[in-house]
Amino acid sequence: MSRILPTILVCSSLVASVGAQGQLESNEPGNDASLGAEAASPNGQCYGHLESASPDKDFWSFTITSPKRLTTWTSRRGAKTTENGGTATSDTVLEVYDPNGFFIGYNDDFGGGKYSLVSVDLPVAGTYYIAVATFVDPYIPGFANGDYALDIICEDPAPAPTYSTAPTESEPNDACASAESTSGGTEHFETLQSIGDSDYYTFTLNRRARVTIETHADTSTTGAACTDPKLWLYDAGCVELSSDDNGGSGSQAMIEQVLEPGTYSVEVSDHQRNAAGDYRLTVDVTILSTQDILPGSPNCPGTSGQPLQLLPREGELPRVGSQVTVDVANVPAGPCAVLLGVTAPPAPLDLTIVGAPGCDLAVNVNLGSFACQPTVAGEAEFGIHIGSVPFPGIRVFAQAAGIDIGANALGVILSAPLRWTIGAETY
């Protein structure tokens, strides 16, 4: 039942908005200034095109009726960038303006790529403006022109975090091997009981996550605080990954780090391991969005000689409340569909027995199959609006299928599967 309930809830939140496409730009060149901005939803995806004749800028506007937190980002729209013979821009700049036209946010490159993300508080109701601009490199001729996708998410400001208080520690817990268990959303009110004492805590992640571990001043146990604590973070082998002394409030310590799935330990002690006293420790875990191509259909070409491909969009964030779109490349002349599910078989199902050697079915199709939306010759796209998924960390699996008579006896080709992990991050 623990697996069935999340599956039902995720299906209900996704199926109603499968196949969603972005709002198309319609006012070029009038949208080169805020007066001609394209009106957009405060929660949605837009599609635009940066012109090649000059450094182009597209303005989009949206209206909110109460204070919000804006997260907006660009991503590639198209299987290939213009530099590689495709239609997508490869490098954007984002600007955000308030209702009075004042500049309040900017980003060029985000997350190690060349697409952009801005996150900023919008303190008052009104109409705001986002400009997507071509990045201009003074040392390289030409412009990063082409198609782009723009996501806009306006959310209520995040409430103050709440925590569950953990049971009192069991000494000795002064090594990785004897560490106390902890998890995201947990707080510990504990004491370094003597000079040189250390307390260790351990936690396990099953998804990629941003973890924040922080000490806070406290005197609730003995009446005397540890005034200058320090934190150390260790991997599963108790090898130190990082440490922090005064990264929190005042002389408190804080470690914030993106971690891969695995088991980790945290040590709390005085900054020189030579003092005692009370402390409060909080642990926050935020599941991060990921999109990964998995093994499957290793040799399943179409009649063109090329395999059907699902291509995650660089810059895309499959997070709660967003629309996530994928490009489909090497689409055959026949119909194309995307198979969608929230589970995958333990191993891909080899379709050799039904006439499609080298082709694997790698998705349990419990969300359904949905038509691709053609874009340019040989390409298509497919999108879902994630909505308010009740369980961040849920995974959604997708696989493209195309009718291609002559490719094999079955007349069907399949792509390798794509796995989205639905995150809940803010910036």
Image (spheres, rainbow, N blue to C red):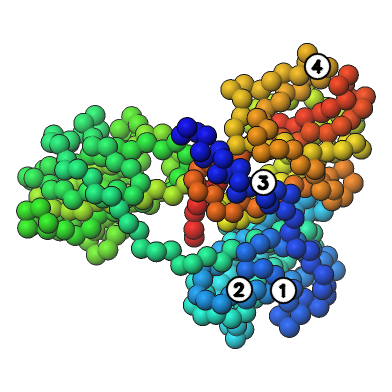
Amino acid under disc 2: Val
For label 2, the residue is: 96
Residue 396 vs residue 200, the one in the foreground: 396
Mark 4 neighbour density, 10 Å: few (under 14) some (14–19) many (20 or more): few
Tell me the mark number nearer the camera, choosing from 3 and 1: 3
* Measured Cα–Cα span from mark 4 to mark 1: 50 Å
For label 4, the residue is: 354
Tell me the mark number nearer the camera, choosing from 2 and 4: 4
Residue 326 vs residue 389, the one in the foreground: 389
Tell me the mark number nearer the camera, choosing from 4 and 3: 3
Which element type, helix, strand or loop, lies under badge 4? helix
Label 4 with label 1: CB-CB less than 8 Å: no
For label 3, the residue is: 15
Mark 3 neighbour density, 10 Å: few (under 14) some (14–19) many (20 or more): some
Residue 48 vs residue 8, the one in the foreground: 8
Mark with earlier residue (4, 1): 1
Tell me the mark number nearer the camera, choosing from 1 and 2: 1
Amino acid under disc 1: Ala
* Measured Cα–Cα span from mark 1 to mark 2: 14 Å
Amino acid under disc 3: Val
Mark with earlier residue (3, 2): 3
Judge from the rendering whether residue 129 lies leftward or rightward of residue 177; answer left or right: right
Q: Position of residue 157 (x, y in %)?
A: 46, 67
